[in-house]
């Protein structure tokens, strides 16, 4: 196994001089060296062929003893020095101080075909940032992160990636419902991959500690490596950097809305500086269209991170990033202008995205979109089924679409909503006729914007239950299905269906705790 190592972060930023692994506050450093915990009996569960290739490895490498050892933490790859990053964050709106990689250990960075990748193990043991926790991860949350990050990529949504999923052979104690019933679960490790794992929180920690020198070093590192088109760092460049992070974050929020993804824990330490979906925890996919839904039981009261609140939270988080960057810029006006711009751009972008989902050439007016969103919510329409089935809509007989609607709702109250839906379908048909919508072209658009397959919450849970019994075939099936989420794949039609009744209230299928 030969990797083209190129450690940029570790070289550009200061290391914690303390190398013993005990929990502590770390100042004046961006990371701490730490060695992964040796797994008891590691076993490879799945590898992403796409990521193997991306980082410069082969299928043969993936079958080697060395691969299993390196990506389970049993062995440190030669000439590398694993480390945990130092960062802070706001959790659920409150300042939480130092957080850091409590259970992620960065192995190394590679450069392959001109692309920079950082590889890290999630669940490979304690670090100086583990606070009171064990640094481990269990199979269920690891399967969820592994499958979803690759699925998101193939949906076209910016995301961190996953290279491998291994079982450690160790048992991990978890109280899944925080109700005093802790149980042992199988320990697992995902190797996550991204150009960088730098988060808003990496900037926040230096600003909080009034460590301007390192704040500048981190900003310069990030700009030089990931925003090189902005040029030599300067005050103006920091402003442009903030502008781009805001734009990328807003685009990500719109993408989550497009596919029906709810992150669940949008704390500032879970916000990628590259606008990637990062830290898959108690996330979920909308089934019945409900902007108030969050899968995260920890957030069930206030629902801060509900589907419909993700874009506003995005700007709240960006404001915290702006505060952290302020000492480098010393002028609030341009930062405020950029944040205001996020807020005014949101609605037009949302309308454009929804118009695309409807297969329209032009943008629909806001009222029509609001009318549709209300109908989808009131009548408990399955988001994925509804939008994908629009490829069967015929503007010359709008009412015929009613049968498709009946097949796509979780409600059994058919008659109450019929008149309103017919009214909407008529307006939609009129719009298509006025804009001279060409059917074949429209169907192509609808099929390329509205996925046929997403990782529904219960699908992941079925794969987890099977994996817990050592059957990994469903992980493989779903992984492959989600490589082409916009393709028809008629042999997999069973995954293009309403959520089964049993999944409505089952843990892992409708609600999740942060315990992972
Ligand atoms: P999260 O909300 O899952 O992103 O986690 C918030 C913080 O808690 C991060 O600093 C994590 O590294 C840390 N953390 C979460 N779970 C564990 C764990 N099992 N062991 C150590 N640290 C953890
Ligand atoms: Mg996190």
Image (cartoon, rainbow, N blue to C red):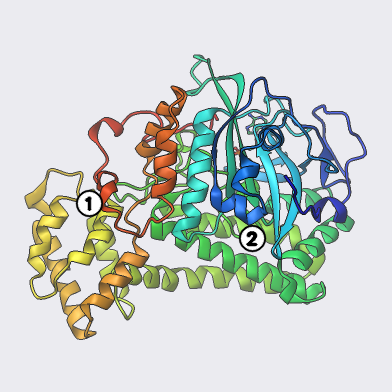
Residue at 62 percent across and 72 percent down: it is 338
The foreground one among 15 and 8 is: 8
The single residue placed furthest to the front in the displayed view is: 60
Q: Give coordinates of residue 314: x percent, y percent.
A: 55, 57
Which disc, if any, is residue 378? 1
Q: The N terminus is located in which quarter? A: top right
- Could you tell whether 190 is left or right of 433 in the image? right
**Image height of 469 relative to 437, above or below:** above
The single residue placed furthest to the right in the displayed view is: 17
- Could you tell whether 130 is left or right of 312 in the image? right
Q: The C terminus is located in which quarter? A: top right
Q: Give the quarter the ligand 1 occupies.
A: top right
Which disc, if any, is residue 503? none
**Image height of 326 relative to 84, above or below:** below
Q: Give coordinates of residue 255: x percent, y percent.
A: 46, 61
Label 1, secondary structure: give it. Answer: helix
The foreground one among 47 and 58 is: 58
Please tell me which of labels 1 and 2 falls first in the chain. 2
Q: Label 2 near label 1: C-beta < 8 Å? A: no
The foreground one among 136 and 303 is: 136
The label nearer to you, 1 versus 2, is: 2
Q: Give coordinates of residue 129: x percent, y percent.
A: 75, 34
* Quarter holding residue 166: top right
Q: Give coordinates of residue 431: x percent, y percent.
A: 21, 79
Q: Is ligand 1 closer than 8 angstroms to the Cβ of mark 1?
A: no
Task: Give me the C-alpha separation between circle 1 and circle 2.
Answer: 36 Å
Mark 1, residues whose alpha carbon is within 10 Å: few (<14), some, or many (≥20)?
some
Q: Give the residue at mark 2.
A: 274
Residue 160 visible to the viewer:
no
């Amino acid at each position: 196994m030969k990797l083209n190592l190129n450690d940029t972060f570790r070289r550009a930023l200061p290391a914690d001089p303390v190398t013993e692994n005990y929990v502590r506050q770390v100042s004046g450093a961006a990371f701490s060296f730490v060695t992964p915990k040796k797994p008891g009996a590691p076993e490879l569960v799945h590898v992403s062929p796409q990521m193997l290739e991306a980082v410069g490895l082969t299928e043969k490498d993936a079958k080697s003893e060395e691969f299993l050892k390196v990506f389970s933490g049993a062995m440190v790859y030669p000439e590398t020095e694993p480390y945990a990053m130092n960062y802070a964050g706001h959790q659920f709106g409150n300042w939480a101080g130092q957080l850091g990689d409590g259970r992620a250990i960065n192995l190394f960075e590679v450069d392959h075909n001109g692309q920079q990748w950082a590889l890290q193990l999630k669940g490979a043991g304690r670090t100086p940032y583990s606070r009171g926790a064990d640094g481990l991860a269990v199979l269920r949350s690891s399967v969820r992160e592994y499958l979803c990050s690759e699925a998101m990529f193939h949906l076209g949504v910016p995301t961190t990636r996953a290279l491998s999923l291994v079982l450690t052979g160790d048992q991990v104690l978890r109280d899944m419902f925080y109700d005093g019933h802790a149980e042992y679960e199988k320990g697992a490790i995902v190797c996550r991959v991204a150009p960088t794992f730098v988060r808003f929180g990496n900037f926040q920690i230096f600003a909080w500690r009034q460590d301007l020198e390192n704040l500048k070093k981190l900003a310069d590192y990030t700009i030089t490596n990931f925003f090189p088109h902005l040029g030599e760092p300067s005050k103006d460049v920091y402003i442009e950097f903030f502008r781009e992070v805001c734009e990328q974050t807003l685009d990500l929020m719109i993408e989550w809305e497009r596919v029906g993804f709810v992150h669940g824990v949008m704390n500032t330490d879970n916000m990628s500086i590259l606008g990637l979906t990062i830290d898959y925890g108690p996330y979920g996919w909308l089934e019945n269209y409900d902007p108030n839904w969050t899968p995260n039981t920890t957030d069930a009261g206030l629902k801060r991170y509900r589907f419909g609140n993700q874009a506003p939270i995005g700007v709240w988080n960006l404001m915290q990033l702006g505060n952290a960057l302020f000492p480098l810029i010393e002028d609030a006006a341009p930062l405020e202008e950029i944040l205001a711009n996020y807020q005014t751009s949101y609605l037009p972008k949302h309308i454009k995205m929804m118009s695309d989902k409807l297969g329209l050439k032009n943008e629909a007016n806001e009222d029509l979109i609001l009318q549709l969103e209300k109908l989808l919510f009131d009548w408990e329409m399955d988001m994925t089924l509804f939008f994908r089935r629009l490829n069967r809509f015929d503007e010359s007989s709008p009412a015929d679409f009613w049968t498709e609607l009946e097949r796509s709702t979780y409600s059994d109250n058919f008659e109450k909503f019929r008149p309103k839906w017919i009214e909407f379908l008529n307006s939609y048909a009129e719009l298509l006729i006025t804009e001279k919508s060409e059917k074949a072209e429209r169907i192509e658009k609808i099929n390329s914007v509205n996925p046929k397959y997403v990782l529904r919450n219960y699908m992941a849970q079925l794969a987890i239950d099977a994996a817990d019994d050592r059957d990994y075939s469903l992980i493989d099936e779903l992984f492959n299905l989600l490589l082409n989420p916009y393709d028809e794949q008629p042999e997999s039609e069973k995954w293009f269906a309403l959520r089964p009744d049993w999944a409505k209230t089952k843990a892992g299928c409708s609600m999740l705790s942060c315990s992972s």
